Amino acid sequence: MNHETASATIAPTSTPNNTENFPPLPRIAERFLTKLEEDSNGCWNYTGACLKDKNGDAKYGIFWNGKTSQLAHRYAFLTFISDEIGDTDVIHHKCNNPKCCNFLSHLAVASHKQNSAAARQDGLLNVPRKPYRKATQTEIDEIRKKHAQGTSKYALAIAYGRSQPYIAAVVSGKLHPIDRPIKPKRIIQRRPTPASAAVAMQEVAA
């Protein structure tokens, strides 16, 4: 569906005058649109399930697209605007509202570098760095279970406040709890040279 079609048919606060020439929306897309509510800032806030931060505040919406769980704003852009974006690109919120799915004016394709630069400019990254949290078996089990059920690594990283490489390491089995017993390394003692032995004897004698 192109931009003009989307604008005429699916804005939450507008009703199309004539939709006979427009292709019908898939049932899943129609269900998605029923979960959007427009606020005074023009944001189309997702009212379905949302990922939460450590304080319990709702952040990015999460939507089941029929195959897997997907970030709601990403689903909105890829479905109603264009699904031809780079593998490393992200969907940037120009409104800085993570629940917004207004793909007509509030969302845009950006690289990770551009997204971080915009967040830094808006003061979203000027926060104290959080101390590193040790991995626990409970968290690892939950991440692996949710990933097996179809939740993406990107969504899991947001939900658990972790980096994507961390999530990838958990899913692949390369990361284990910090409190897991670690096999001691084998210590190989080298045979001292005559010079080093002489120095050692002098230190002991002193």
Image (cartoon, helix red, strand yellow):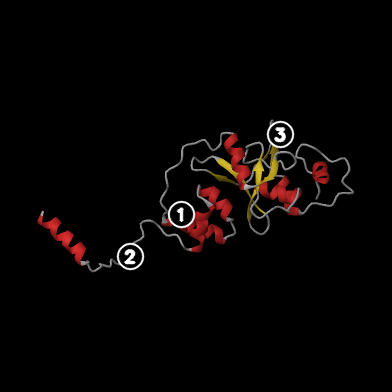
Who is closer to the viewer here, 48 or 143? 143
Q: Mark 2 vs mark 3: which is more N-terminal?
A: 3
Residue found at the far front of this picture: 195
Q: Is residue 33 above or below residue 170?
A: above
Q: The disc labelled 3 sits on which kind of residue? A: Gly
Distance between mark 2 and mark 3 Cα atoms: 57 Å
Three-letter code, disc 2: Lys
Residue drawn at x 49%, y 54% as measured from the top left? 166
Judged from the image, the secondary structure of the residue bearing numbered disc 2 is loop
Label 1 Cα neighbours within 10 Å, binned few <14 / some 14-19 / many ≥20: some
Q: Looking at the picture, which amino acid does disc 1 mark?
A: Glu
> Which is more foreground, mark 2 or mark 3?
2
- Residue 177 in the figure: left or right of residue 1: left
Q: Secondary structure at mark 3?
A: loop
Residue beneath the point at 67% across and 38% down: 94
Judged from the image, the secondary structure of the residue bearing numbered disc 1 is helix
